[in-house]
Amino acid sequence: MSTPPGSPPPARRPNRRSVYEEAIGRRGLSRRLQLPGRRALVADDRLPRMDLLERAGELKGMLVDFALSPRFDNELTEVIWQSFPDGVVDDEAKFTMVLDHFALQHRLRSGGTVVEAFVAANPQLADAERDMLLGWRDVVEGVFEVRGRDRDAVLLSNFVDELTYRARSNVGRTAFTALKKRMIVVGRLVRVGDDWMVSGNPAAFPASARDQMLVAVAHEAMRNPAAVFRNPEKLAEARRLLTEQHDLFVELFGADLIVVPGSEVSGKVREFYHHVAKQVRPDAEPPDPAGLSLDGADLLDADHVAIHFVPGEGLSFYPDFDLIEDVFANPALLSRRRYREVLTYLLRDPETSPEPLRQLAARDLSKANAVFEKLLKRKRGFRWDTEGEALLRQHKPGYFDGSQLPRTVPLSKTLSDALQRSRP
């Protein structure tokens, strides 16, 4: 298509080189990121005698070279564009973090990760090297306070999970020269033997930035419970709190699943959290629950919503639950599309607890058998009483393999106080 005279040329999406190699400098890329040059990976018979961290540094450089290879051009370009929408890499620290995430954690279109592809492409790796590399998929991301030094390592206390990490660098102790006690470090760590290695390019802030950083950490902890629950003590604390809150929900409403008009959902939730707060401070005016934002959600527009306190998980909401109750009272309703859609979603959504279906089915097993035989047309003769649990395991594996985490996050006093101070 031709361009009209006087018009600017059409915008052209730069290739990968113009996005980041020219921004950072092709010749300086490896030097500035402290990466070794490209080389072939060979089995290293020095492994038993050499420091594992030294070998980790070599392997990390090779892995990053592998991630920058033409094999991943298209997918890395997409990731770079998401992080730098204007096509200019103007923040080297951010770029190294993006590249580090791409190499270790980004899910490729093939379903795997770059580090998994690297290990598969190098079968000569020693078992210890292979295990270490694959272990790097589990990255500790956090905001850390510098607690001190331990020989060539720095001790970093993570505000997110409240654990302390002994972290080393593959470039040696000089990497920590600028770090002083109580400074704040935002970065990524990966496991190397019994220690941890700094991965990517961390950012350091003065101790005076602590209060401001803590507010951001508190919000991130509530958005990402998995990062908090790296600490098994925090996970145990969350489960204990959930047990107590589940009992309080039942005490207040008479059951752990109630159905109310959508317009009443916010009020019921506030009533519950006020009830919980009263157990801690009976004489105080209970505050509105932090982070409660149901306004504008589909829940409020639904005729009926189930509010369910899922044991071990927390509050869940199911809009149009009255339709599902009607189906279990009259299975013939499944001939109508809307009823089938709502029930199918409740069954197949892996994030939705299996408990509501169990409770509905327990009301009348013969009708439950009829409901699922009608819903699962390809499974003639399906019986909920003998095959229901297997069906739930198929669609909701996280509720059976232990990977489903609590949604209640017990913040430390440090983070709770920071949030309190930040509120007007």
Image (spheres, grey):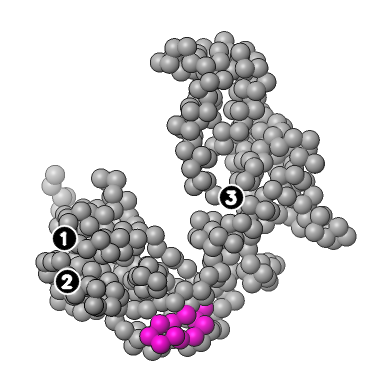
Graded by Cα atoms within 10 Å as few (under 14), some (14 to 19) or many (20 or more), the crowding at tag 2 reads few
Q: Residue at x 66, y 32 (%)?
A: 305
Q: Residue furthest front?
A: 48
Q: Is 99 in front, or is 60?
A: 60
Nearest to viewer (mark 2 / mark 1): 2
Nearest to viewer (mark 1 / mark 3): 1
Q: Disc 2 residue type?
A: Asp
Report helix, strand or loop for mark 2: loop
Is 156 displayed left or right of 118 in the figure?
Answer: right
Q: Position of residue 394 (x, y in %)?
A: 45, 31
Residue 114 sits inside the magenta stretch: no
Which residue is labeled 2 in the image? 45
In the rendered image, is residue 247 in sight? Answer: yes
Q: Position of residue 168 (x, y in %)?
A: 37, 78
Main SS, magenta residues: strand
Report helix, strand or loop for mark 3: loop
Is 137 displayed left or right of 17 in the figure?
Answer: right
Q: Is 381 in front, or is 254?
A: 381
Q: Residue at x 40, y 15 (%)?
A: 378
